[in-house]
Image: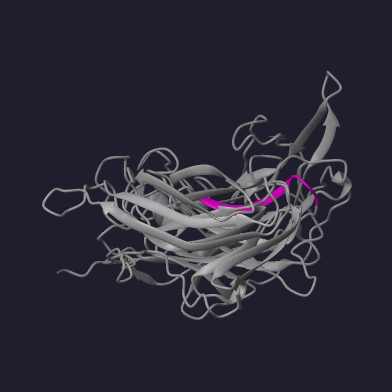
Amino acid sequence: MNRKRILALTLCSALALGLFSGCSSKEETKPADSSSVSSGEEKTESSAGENTEVPDAEAPELEGYNLLWHDEFSAPELDTSIWTYDPHEPGWTNSELQEYTTTEENVFTRDGKLVLKAIKTKDENDKDYYTSGKIKGQNLSDFMYGKVVASAKVPEGQGLWPAIWMMPTDEEHYGIWPKCGEIDIMEVLGHQTDTAYGTLHYGEPHGEQQGTYKLEGGDTFASDFHEYSVEWEPGEMRWYIDGNLYHTVNDWFSAVDGEDDKPYPAPFDQTFYVQMNLAVGGTWPGNPDASTDFDKAEFEIDYVRVYQKPEYDTNVTKPVPNYREPLEDGNYIYNGDFSEAEALDDEENWRFLLFNGGEGTGEIKDNELFITQQAKGTEEYSVQVVQAELPMYKGDKYRLTFDASADEKNRVMKVCISAPTSGWVRYLPDTVVHLTTEKQTFAYEFEMTRKDDHNGRLEFNFGKFFPLSSVHISNVRLEKIEEFSDDAEHPEG
């Protein structure tokens, strides 16, 4: 097999070759002078107040990389050789509330930093109206493969949603989102600023793989600047915070639903650009409330730096996923030794998780899962017990069974089998389970109708349900009851 390599394309060489939306070239192209894209130097006054040019910091060298471009935000206004404003009306995406504007009230530089500021005003009907800032490097500082490094400080407040992320220059090349791909370098929710997320989106059907990094000891991403980075290579992406690797992905795909996948590593074999924004509200963070202080709703970015290796090996193949084998009795649930008392946080297969104000504990006790709950939280999944890595094959039929009871009657929970790396679709739909103080056996059958998935996830959700009585779950089984029969092969897609 011939081995293909590409020399890294800088901005200028990509422009010259018209490779904004194409796949990697077999030809070798020498990188152009990366100094052609750098921080702006012209002095002006910002409408955000007195703002003079500050000394332009030098971007450090990284071993094995060349500096492609960088912006230290030392100029008194946005460098439009790298960035452009990206205005949008409210509700443009994710049910967000803000209007992205081109005004210097929402986007400005100050003391060597870029500031994206969310502002709360009133509309003509005296209703709350929000404006904010979003910039992007599309058709200005696009690149294919490299390491993005950004230092930023996020705002704190319910409904605030800062992000540094990447999209392809030509979103139509493989099809509209999510087929085109998306690289989220960092996202932080304003009501939970001790946690940052790095995510890869692709598909169709929509696939996503998300990593989470949580600060300990009371530190938050709002209290100081932190460095976020992603290393994008032809066959792998890696996410870091302050130099700590916390997420790695190498098994994405791009396809039209029901059709064969595009050749790997599509869709991440084309030029992408960096963009940054501060959203207000939306489906993930929820809307702001009376506690949100818009005087402090500022997303500050100290620098953005993009590096590239001199060349990248594009002769990559998609890893073959490892599908869990059932136990000898046909059960795909790995219960471990239920006779040993053990906190679920430390158990290898079962995990106890808390989100959005949920409070409780989970443990293995007396041969069962034992869940106590002190606060319901705001979501059904605010208190949950899960087991992941369950093999789901298209066309096969499954049965889930378990025994459950509660310490008080009329206790409610929900069960489902979800797809955390395939857009959180449900293979077994969210199902209400009514518990009593007497142990009952529950059984649910379903057919898997989507693309094969090695990472199905069983969820028991206790979140915002009453009463908050303890729950006992035992004898959990997931077994295949009928296989798709076509010469023992599963259907594609």
Regarding residue 142, the answer to whether it shows in the image is no
In the rendered image of this protein, does residue 1 appear above or below residue 101? below
Q: Is residue 163 magenta?
A: yes
Residue 241: x %, y % from top left = 62, 70
Regarding residue 368, the answer to whether it shows in the image is yes
Q: Main secondary structure of the magenta part?
A: strand
Describe residue 376's horizontal placement relative to residue 208 as left or right: right
Along the line of sight, which residue is nearer the eye, 105 or 441? 441
Residue farthest top in this picture:
125
Residue 36: x %, y % from top left = 53, 59
Residue 273: x %, y % from top left = 51, 51
Describe residue 71's horizontal placement relative to residue 256 as left or right: right
* Picture residue at 77% right of the left edge, 42% below the top: 106
- In this figure, which colouring scheme has been used for the structure? one colour
Residue 184: x %, y % from top left = 55, 55
Q: Is residue 281 magenta?
A: no
Along the line of sight, which residue is nearer the eye, 374 or 207? 374
Quarter of the N terminus within the rendering: bottom left
Q: Which residues are magenta?
A: 157-166
Q: Quadrant of residue 97?
A: top right
Residue farthest front in this picture:
438
Along the line of sight, which residue is nearer the eye, 411 or 59? 411
Describe residue 220's horizontal placement relative to residue 350 as left or right: right
In the rendered image of this protein, does residue 47 appear above or below residue 35? above
